[in-house]
Amino acid sequence: MALLVSAASAYGAIFPDQIGEFKKGPVKTIAVPDQALYAEYGLDASEQAEYAAGPKHFSATLWRMRDSTGAMALFESRRPPGAIPVKLSKLAVQTSDGVIFAYGNYVFRMTGDVPPTAALQSIYDSLPKLEQSPLPPLMTDLPVDGLVPNSERYILGPVSLDRFEARIPRSVAAFHLGAEGQLGSYQTAQGPMTLAIFSYPTPSIARQQYQDFQKIPGGIARRVGNLVAVTVAPPDRDAAERLLSQVHYDTNMVWNEPIPDHEVRDKVRYILDVFVFAGLLIAGCVVAGVAFGGYRTLRRKLRRGDDPEAMITLHLS
């Protein structure tokens, strides 16, 4: 049982002493319900605290992951089926008793008299080891038509694959090749269907693994770019084909347009003008220097008596 307790005490308190009008009570350790899954998602620390302000109080729990992708994966796995999206953060839902949201590499769950959004800034300002890298594009690649709300699950390794779609062999997903996956449940006229999309570093690797996905008993797969979409034993194969056809791969292309001839001539003329001006400036400086030196020499020869501007020398020989 000792292994199931979070290591928050090893990192010190994370929650601030006060959130808005609420003051923090004793910090508690929390149990990890699925240690293998949380470890794969990159659990680094967790903490729970009670806050109170007179008769109002709320409970706050956080999980700190190694990166924002792991936090997004944990957020998806903790959402209840009836959760409703809210504008608390980019990843946030309202539950029957509070809210669940992600901020960078942190996942928060608050129940009770949840403070307003503005008061939560005090939490964000004091977060240690905060990491806010961009979320993977794969999380938005699932087709939205027929998608069951809150059914999305992110797959980072063999543990999450076994938890959410065990019918796909680990060797086929090939996480050692850099694969990540996103799956969701869909409702069809014949029953529920699960669609999983795996992303690979290059299209060639995806093409190689696509051959193995096609060999899964009852599986239907489709490759698009570096993505492989698959559904296993769908209740309606026609619906599965329609769903797979909605999976798209967007590429970033750079279009090099030819520069018009008149723009090239203008740039060349500008560069030549700069060189001509510099040459004229240097020539003018040379002429002015020669003229000034000649004037001084001529003046010295025509002047009688001592030259007041002559250099003073000491004959110390």
Image (cartoon, rainbow, N blue to C red):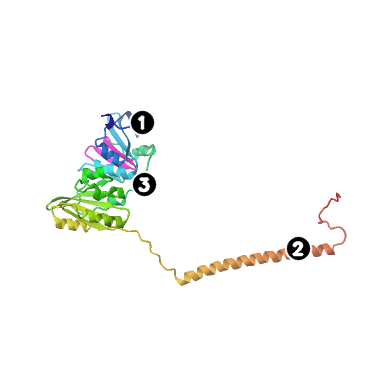
Which secondary structure, mark 3? loop
Q: Are marks 2 and 3 in contact (CB under 8 Å)?
A: no
In the structure shown, which secondary structural element does the residue marked by tag 1 occupy? helix
N-terminal of the pair, mark 2 or mark 3, is 3
- Residue linked to disc 1: 10
Q: Which residue is mark 2?
A: 293
Residue type of the residue flagged with mark 2: Gly
Q: CA distance from mark 2 to mark 3?
A: 67 Å
In front of the other: 290 or 36:
36
The amino acid at mark 3 is Ser
The residue that appears at 36% across and 31% down in the rendered structure is 10
Most foreground residue, 191 or 206: 206
Local crowd size for mark 2, using a 10 Å CA cut-off: few (<14), some (14–19), many (≥20): few
Q: Quadrant of residue 206?
A: bottom left
Image coords of residue 75 (percent x, y):
27, 42
Point 77% across, 65% down: residue: 294
Residue position for label 3 = 133
Q: Residues within 10 Å of mark 1 (few under 14, many from 20)?
A: few
Residue 293 visible to the viewer:
yes
Residue at 69% x, 65% y: name it: 286
| Left/right of residue 13 with respect to residue 311 in the rendered view | left
Span colored in magenta: 95-113
Q: Secondary structure at mark 2?
A: helix
Extreme residue in the top direction: 26
Image position of 85 (left or right of 271): left
Q: Is residue 152 visible?
A: no
